[in-house]
């Protein structure tokens, strides 16, 4: 299916565990982004990537790791999950004409217990 | 970092009423975007604005790019139950990274 897909949709993990959230897009968009959404904070940028093998920190990168070996995939890893990382995570992508906005995935709801 | 102030934070309105919300920035933007997020889904782009003073409609939605380039407004006419959700404004303070407002939660009484 064309579009941007995130997996899993829901995840419960324990404090201290490593967890990876997946993001896949089929448009060959250059840019990909990871946001977290928390009540009262809106959408906060965690990491972004301008192309394969190029990544950069956003507003709240601590505790997260990203990689982008292929244009279509942009996984987000929580190296040692903490309760404060309980959130809804959104992946987004855009082409070079970013001014038309980003296209978002459906999100992953992560609960750290 | 760059902040967008979006208001109101939430609204609870009667079906059929008109709705207004706004977004302000401390810096000038060249683009304003409005997104809607349905429950359990990701945000979807509603309207994009590229020029100061621009007024753009999408069905019952109308958005305006403020003349100062530091604000934008979204109006929804004759609200219906499916208008519920979170409305986000967004803009690019620099480069290609968008910043988002905290959102306006819209609840509609049927």
Image (tube, rainbow, N blue to C red):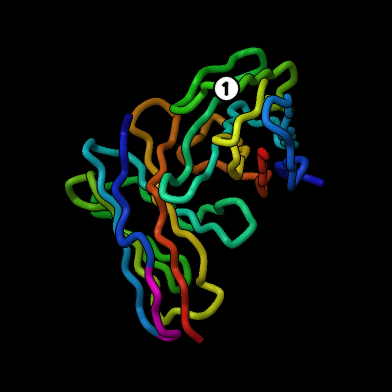
- Residue B108 is situated, as x and y percent measured from the top left of the image, at 47, 78
> Residue placed at 70% from the left, 30% from the top?
A28
Q: Residue at image x 29%, y 39%? A: B29
Q: Taking A13 as reference, is B23 above or below it?
A: below
Residue lying at the far right of the rendered structure: A1
Query: Magenta includes A66?
Result: no
Q: Which residue is drawn at 56% across and 74% down?
A: B82
Q: Examine the rendering and report whether any part of residue B32 can be seen.
A: yes
Q: Picture quarter containing residue A13?
A: top right
Query: Disc 1: which chain?
Result: A
Estimate the x, y position of residue B11 in percent, counting from the top left: 37, 70
In the image, the segment drawn in magenta is B11-16
Q: Where is B98 relative to B22, above or below?
A: above
Task: Tell me residue B34's x, y (percent).
Answer: 43, 53
* Quadrant including the N terminus of chain B: top left
The residue closer to the viewer here, B45 or A55, is A55
């Amino acid at each position: 299916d064309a579009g941007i897909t995130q997996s899993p949709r829901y995840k419960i993990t324990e404090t201290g565990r490593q967890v990876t959230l997946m993001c896949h897009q089929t448009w060959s968009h250059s840019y990909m982004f990871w946001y977290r959404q928390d009540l009262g904070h809106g959408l906060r940028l965690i990491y972004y990537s301008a192309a394969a093998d190029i990544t950069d920190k956003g507003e709240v990168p601590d505790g997260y790791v990203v990689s982008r070996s292929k244009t279509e995939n942009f996984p987000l890893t929580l190296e040692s999950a903490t309760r404060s990382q309980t959130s809804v995570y959104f992946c987004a992508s855009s082409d070079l004409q970013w001014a038309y906005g980003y296209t978002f995935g459906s999100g992953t709801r992560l609960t750290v217990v | 970092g760059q902040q967008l102030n979006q208001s109101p934070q939430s609204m609870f309105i009667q079906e059929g009423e008109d709705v207004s919300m706004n977004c302000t920035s401390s810096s000038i933007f060249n683009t304003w975007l409005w997104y809607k997020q349905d429950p359990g889904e990701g945000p979807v782009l509603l309207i994009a604005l590229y020029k100061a003073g621009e007024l753009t409609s999408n069905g019952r939605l109308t958005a305006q790019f403020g003349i100062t380039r530091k604000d934008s407004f979204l109006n929804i006419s004759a609200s219906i139950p499916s208008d519920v959700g979170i409305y986000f404004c967004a803009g690019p303070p620099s480069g290609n990274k968008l910043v988002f407002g905290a959102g306006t939660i819209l609840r509609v009484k049927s």
